Each structure stands twice: as structure tokens, then as C-alpha cells.
Image (cartoon, grey):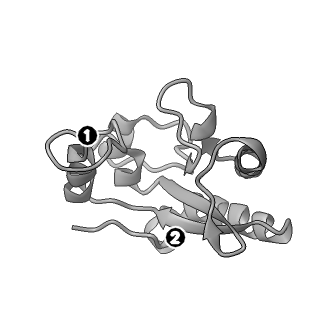
Amino acid sequence: MKNSRSLDDLLPPVKERAMWLLNECRARGIDLLVTSTYRDLESQAALYAQGRTAPGLIVTNAKPGMSFHNWRVAFDVVPLRAGKLVWGTTGDDGKLWRQIGEIGEDAGLEWAGRWKSFKELAHFQYTGGLTLMQLAAGKVPE
């Protein structure tokens, strides 16, 4: 089972954009921790089971093979303030997340903080316009 935090496990165009996001945030005084990059299908199954058939809260709606993490084109981050993880979404915390999201979008990433359903502030992806089916068939974004 593999649930990576390494940018090296992302496809090159995704890694490049992720590094740009991390560096640009650092230049603006924002520290980010990468919490997830590539997840194999077994790890995705375990996450999907959470809150359903296993203890815990539901953290994903994506079954194995249906997460962009499974195809090495997505990653999650969390900001740190004074060494503490920032999970809040209102007030100054919400402003921080929006700033990070905008920086990610400037890097050419899709930010899940703008999604209408299952909004996920920590999630970024770069698919190059490819669908999950195309990624599963072996196509890679440029």
C-alpha cells in the first residue's frame, strides 16, 4: 500500500507546478506541508472505506481508480502558522486558504477549493485537460 507525500511521485508537469506553488508560497511567507501526492489503488480503497465500512470520517468520494491522486496528477497541502497546521476555513484561516488557492491557480493548477460539490481546500491537480479514463488508459498531461 502506498500513500506518498513526495513530489517525486507526481508526473513531471504536475511536480513542476507543485514546486512552483511551494516556492511562491514560501516567498510570500506561507509555509506549506505536502500531505498527499500519489496513492495506489489499495490506499484509495482504504480511504474510501473510511466512514463507510471502516471507522472515521468520510474524507473522499473517490473509489479506487476514480481519484486523480491514483494517476499521479494531484496533491494535497496544508499551511502552517507558527508551526501548527491550519485546517480552519473562516476568518484569517479562510483568507490564507484563498491566497494559496489563487497562487496554485497562477501555477496552472486546478484548485478544488472552487469545486461546487465536495469542495476541498487542500487539493490541487493538473490534468492537462485529460479525463480519468484517459489517464487510466496511459495518457499523460503535457
Which quarter of the image is occupied by the N terminus?
bottom left
Residue at image point 69% right, 41% down = 90
What residue appears at the point 57 percent right and 30 percent down from the top-left corner? 115
Asked if 101 appears above or below 31 in the picture, the reply is above
Q: Nearer the viewer, residue 41 or 118?
A: 118
Quick one: which residue is furthest to the left in this view? Answer: 53
Spot the residue most to the top.
116
Q: Position of residue 129 (x, y in %)?
A: 54, 36
Report the amino acid beneath label 2: Leu
| Residue nearer the viewer, 21 or 118 | 118
- Residue tagged 1: 63
Element under disc 2: helix
Left or right of 52 on screen, residue 101: right
Question: Up-down: is 65 above or below 17?
Answer: above
Number of other residues with Cα within 10 Å of mark 2, as a class: few under 14, some 14 to 19, many 20 or more: many
Q: Position of residue 121 (x, y in %)?
A: 59, 44
Mark number, residue 7: 2
Q: Quadrant of residue 112?
A: top right
The amino acid type, in three-letter code, at marker 1 is Lys
Q: Residues within 10 Å of mark 1 (few under 14, many from 20)?
A: some
- Taking the spot 39% from the left edge, 61% from the top edge, the residue there is 38
Image position of 10 with respect to 61: above or below: below
- Pinpoint residue 53: horizontal percent, then vertical percent: 14, 42
The answer to whether 119 appears left or right of 22 in the picture is left
Left or right of 23 in this view: 70: left
At mark 1, the secondary structure is loop
> Which is nearer the N-term, disc 2 or disc 1?
2
C-alpha gap between disc 2 and disc 1 = 23 Å
Quadrant of residue 135 within the rendered picture: top left
Look at 73% across and 52% down and name the residue there: 100
